[in-house]
Every structure is written in structure tokens, then in C-alpha cells.
Image (cartoon, rainbow, N blue to C red):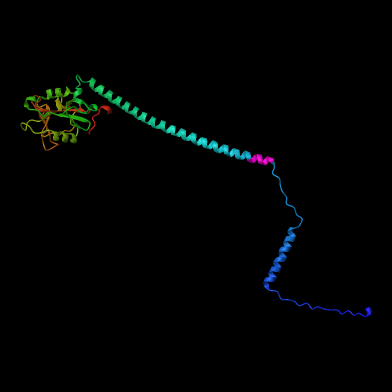
């Protein structure tokens, strides 16, 4: 009978199956990931801040301002470069013109000295100073046949006996060139003179210099320039006799070269004049 049906209860025993470590890790990761995804799916919304039109305009204005400043700076640099180039050109030109002006002023002073020198001469032998060459007119500091030593020029007369002169005539000859019989101021000058004179005729003849005895009380030795003698290079101490003029003798001893003699005796002579400085464009340049 239907009521007599017996139901038996079936019980299943659950056996646990061991899992590997990888399976466990995978399960854990899967579980955590699922959890995070669940969390991120929470109902939170992103906040979007709208940009104001004012800030956009300000940004554009700043960019334009930077561009204008850069353009202005570039223009200033170019303008400054052009001005500096022009300034340097003007400065170079000014320096050249100033140097030229100084040369002209120096030449003017030299010309004034020459004119002053010429004005004191009865005759000025310009051809003895200046010569025409292929480069134009060139002038030397000394007359032809005169020898320069420092700031002075010397003429040593080396002619024959028919051209010898007294002391006074020798001075007149020197004056015709604007010079005088030589004054000797120091040992170096006396050495220079000894190098350019040579022995002639006999031991009593020499070369007239500009020293003579002036008739005063007491008598004094003076130069043609009017300066009184200080020191001297005497061979023997001069005596106050009729030997009133002085010769420079040919002597190996520089400090003993002077000898007093009669002024009317005929001898060779030495003239001396200051070097004549010419403007640069007239100076004779050595090759």
C-alpha cells in the first residue's frame, strides 16, 4: 500500500580534496580582485571643474606679452649692435684725425723754428739742406759735408794751405752758414772732435775752436756764444800773452788737446751748429 512506502535517508560523506599552492594563490588573488572590483563599482562620481573664460584670456595675453617682450629685446639688441658698430667706426676715424692733427701741429711748430732760424741768417742756403729726389723734396738735419753728432752738426775744414784762415776769418766763414767756431762742452764732444781731425803740416798747426781770450781785467777765456770757460782740456796752462785764440791739436790724449796760439796764425777750423729739424714730410728717410 501506498502508505507503507518507506523512504530511506541517503547520507553523502563530503571528502575534502587537497588543493595545490598555486590554486590557493589563484583563488586568493581572484577573491581580492573581485573584492576591489566590487569596491570600485561603488556609486562615486568624478568631479569635473570647468575652466573659466577669464583664465583662458589671461593665458593668451601672457603668451602675447612674452612674444612682444622677446621681439622688443631682439630689436634692442640689433639696434645696439648697429649703434656700437657705427660708434667704433667713428672712434677709429676720430683717432686717425686726432693723430693727423697732432702731426700737423708738430709740423707747424717745426716750421716756426725753421722760419725763426732763417730770419736770423743773412743768406740761407736751402740747397745745402734740401734736395729733390724721386720721392719729392727731402731735407737733412745737417748741411752737406757736415757731420751730425747728437743735436749738433760739425764742419771740419780739411783743405790745403791756401785755404787756411785766421781765427777771426774762420769765425766769419762759420757765421755765413749760421754757425760759429765749435764750443766743446764735455769729454765726449772732445773725443768726437779728435776722431775727425788729422795731423797736417807740422805739430804746431791745429784746428781753430770757438775759444778766445777776452780783453778784460783780468783777462778771461770765453766762447763765441759769450759763455765763460769752465775747466778745459789744455796741453799746457795758457799764459796771458798775445796767444789769445785756441787750437784743438791732434793728440792721442783727449784730456790734453788745447793749445793757445796767435789769432793771426793760419790754420784749419771746426764749425758747429744746432741740428735743423724738418717737418716729417720733408725729412730724409734712410733706405
From what the image shows, is residue 22 above or below residue 284?
Answer: below
The magenta stretch spans residue 19: no
List x then y, in percent, for residue 113. 26, 24
In which quadrant of the rendered image does the N terminus lie? bottom right
List x then y, in percent, for residue 13. 79, 78
Q: Which residues are magenta?
A: 53-59
Tell me which residue sits at (14%, 23%) in the image.
173
In which quadrant of the rendered image does the C terminus lie? top left
Extreme-left residue of the structure:
202
List x then y, in percent, for residue 97. 36, 28
From what the image shows, is residue 279 above or below residue 39?
Answer: above
The image quarter in which residue 67 lies? top right
The magenta stretch spans residue 56: yes
In-front residue for pair 244/267: 267
In-front residue for pair 270/251: 270
Asked whether, in this view, residue 101 is left or right of residue 273, the answer is: right
Query: Would residue 225 be seen by someone viewing this image from the given angle?
Result: no
In-front residue for pair 164/20: 20
Image mark count: 0
Extreme-front residue of the structure:
1
Tell me which residue sits at (71%, 68%) in the image.
28
Asked whether, in this view, residue 213 is left or right of residue 96, the answer is: left
Q: Assign the magenta stretch its main secondary structure.
A: helix
Tell me which residue sits at (46%, 33%) in the image.
82
Query: Would residue 188 be seen by someone viewing this image from the given angle?
Result: yes
Extreme-top residue of the structure:
122
In-front residue for pair 182/263: 182
The image quarter in which residue 22 lies? bottom right
List x then y, in percent, for residue 106. 31, 27
The image quarter in which residue 60 lies? top right
Amino acid at each position: 500500500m501506498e502508505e507503507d512506502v518507506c523512504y530511506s535517508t541517503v547520507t553523502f560523506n563530503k571528502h575534502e580534496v587537497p588543493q595545490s599552492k598555486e590554486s590557493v594563490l589563484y583563488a586568493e588573488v581572484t577573491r581580492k580582485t573581485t573584492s576591489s572590483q566590487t569596491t570600485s563599482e561603488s556609486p562615486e562620481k568624478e568631479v569635473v571643474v570647468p575652466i573659466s573664460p577669464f583664465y583662458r584670456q589671461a593665458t593668451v595675453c601672457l603668451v602675447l606679452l612674452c612674444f612682444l617682450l622677446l621681439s622688443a629685446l631682439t630689436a634692442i639688441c640689433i639696434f645696439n649692435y648697429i649703434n656700437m658698430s657705427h660708434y667704433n667706426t667713428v672712434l677709429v676715424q676720430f683717432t686717425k684725425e686726432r693723430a693727423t692733427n697732432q702731426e700737423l701741429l708738430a709740423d707747424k711748430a717745426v716750421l716756426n723754428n725753421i722760419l725763426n732760424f732763417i730770419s736770423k741768417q743773412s743768406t740761407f742756403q736751402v740747397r745745402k739742406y734740401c734736395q729733390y729726389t724721386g720721392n719729392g723734396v727731402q731735407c737733412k738735419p745737417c748741411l752737406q759735408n757736415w757731420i751730425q753728432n747728437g743735436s749738433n752738426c760739425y764742419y771740419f775744414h780739411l783743405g790745403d794751405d791756401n785755404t787756411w784762415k785766421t781765427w777771426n776769418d774762420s769765425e766769419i766763414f762759420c757765421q755765413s752758414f749760421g754757425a760759429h767756431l765749435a764750443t766743446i762742452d764735455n769729454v765726449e764732444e772732445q773725443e768726437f772732435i779728435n776722431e775727425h781731425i788729422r795731423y797736417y803740416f807740422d805739430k804746431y798747426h791745429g784746428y781753430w775752436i770757438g775759444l778766445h781770450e777776452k780783453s778784460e781785467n783780468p783777462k778771461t777765456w770765453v766762447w763765441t756764444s759769450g759763455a765763460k770757460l769752465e775747466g778745459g782740456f789744455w796741453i799746457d796752462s795758457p799764459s796771458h800773452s798775445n796767444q789769445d785764440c785756441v787750437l784743438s791739436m791732434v793728440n792721442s790724449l783727449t784730456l790734453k788737446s788745447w793749445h793757445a796760439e796767435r789769432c793771426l796764425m793760419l790754420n784749419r777750423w771746426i764749425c758747429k751748429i744746432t741740428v735743423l729739424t724738418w717737418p716729417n714730410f720733408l725729412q730724409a728717410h734712410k733706405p
